[in-house]
Amino acid sequence: MGVTVAIVGRPNVGKSTLFNRLVGKRLALVDDTPGVTRDRREGEARIGDLKFKLIDTAGFEDVTGDSLPARMRRQTEEAVRLADLVLLMIDARAGVTPLDAQFAQLLRKSGRPVALIANKAESRAAEAGLLEAYSLGFGEAVPVSAEHGIGLSDLHALVAEAVEAARAEEQAGEQPSPGLDELLPETDVDIKEGETPNWDPTRQLSMAIIGRPNAGKSTLINTMLGAERMLTGPEAGITRDSIAVNWDWQGRGIRLIDTAGIRKRARVRQKLEKLSVADALRAIRYAEIVVLLLDAGQPFEKQDLQLADLVEREGRALVIAVNKWDLVKQKSERLAELREMADRLLPQLRGVSLVTISGLKGTNLDRLMEAVLKTEKTWNARVPTARLNRWLEEVTARHTPPAVSGRRLKLRYMTQAKTRPPSFVLFCSRPDALPAAYQRFLVNGLREDFGLDGVPLRLWVRGGENPYVKKGGKRR
């Protein structure tokens, strides 16, 4: 297993800035406000020829109990426990603070190897702080500037020893948790005539959990993982970054992406929350399956519907999970009501899977994952061209396309051009004249007759003759 390095320190010393520079991507949110990072975030880092797993952590604070800062501190302590090397970061311009000294004392007790780095050391104002750093007991501090990329060669030497020690013992094991900026999932997959669909149902599946603040997203992921991996609590808006972790469900590899709660745009005023929301919306693009988590006490609010519509427009597959079901009374009546609301309010995703769960108690998680895998299969579905055109002939015989300006429209041919999501091309005599209502009729028919419920469908109308028929009426 490769080396794991954790960056720790008090709030606002520049940990996330260094994390982003070493992983080469803007994975962690960065702002001048102290305490931006709350969960621990992992990424694949590189300095020169060295590759290692890097953990960004929340700023250390001297708190206990069950408050939000105390729970953030426990996430940092867990990162220290997992690390092969701990990089203790201080602000060189501010010098050594009492909180730095207290944290250094705790790190000595942890028994983990610790190296001291002094950030914001690009100016002469940092010289006094570099001298003060000796008082922490970790030797000379390595001066760096995470913002300007200064001092990375010295940082290379610190990490190299830990990497070399682990390289001898490296073997196949648990894959590191990926960041969101790995390759986008394969979507809009072209289909060539006579080619078998290239889909492996055993491959790792990327799944994002989205929803309004305090819907229970992080609690659900913690229950799935069987560990307090995500920071949770009764306060709304705890999660800020989109955090990706690996999970195994009955032998299937799943990449879970926890996201920040998304409120109505009018209520999002602070810069930091805007960054969090943008990160959550970006996570949808990096997922294949999106689980929209609703609060059973307030389901299908306007923001929920807008999120579902966004997932459909991005072409991702959607599963709706109604959380906190353990608090609902008269469950059967409420479930029937929710299903009716889903079909009525989300006609563009008619038949979308809806599962009632309790993320806190772990109720119905098997049913949720069954719905996820079923939806994934539908999202990858391919309908043979011959079946499509037999269906088109039957449908147009029962419901003839309308005449526009006194001229009949001729629907000549249909084929499926892509999967992920299923996308179809219809050849028509006058494509611009085919009414939107008739196109919706065809899409609904495709859903019902080919079992494509609950996933986005695309229908493109093109002009011209059947491309598979030569002039004179013979097929190619």
Image: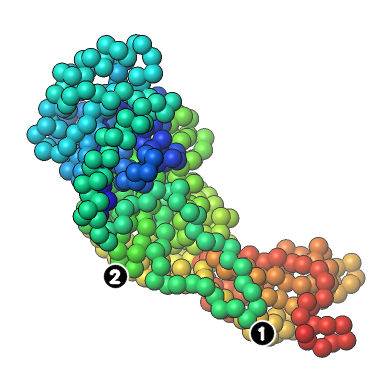
| Residue 415 appears in view | yes
**Of residues 40 and 52, which is closer to you in this image?**
52
Residue, disc 1: 386
Describe the element under mark 1 as helix, strand or loop.
Answer: helix
Q: Is residue 333 visible?
A: no
Residue that sits furthest to the bottom in the current view: 474
Residue lying farthest to the right in this orientation: 406
Residue 289 occupies quadrant: bottom left
Q: Is residue 181 above or below residue 409?
A: above
Residue at x 62%, y 72% (from the top left corner): 191
Q: Which mark is residue 250?
A: 2
Q: Position of residue 2 (x, y in %)?
A: 27, 51
**Is 86 placed above or below 171 here?**
above
The Cα atoms of the two marked residues, 2 and 1, are separated by 37 Å
**352 left or right, relative to 228:** right
Where is residue 184? Give x, y as percent. Answer: 50, 54
Dot 2 crowding, Cα within 10 Å, few <14, some 14–19, many 20+: few
Q: Using the image, determine if residue 396 lies above or below residue 27.
A: below
Tell me the crowding category of disc 1: few under 14, some 14 to 19, or many 20 or more residues within 10 angstroms, Cα based. Answer: few
The amino acid beneath tag 1 is Ala
Query: Which quarter of the figure is the N terminus placed in?
Result: bottom left
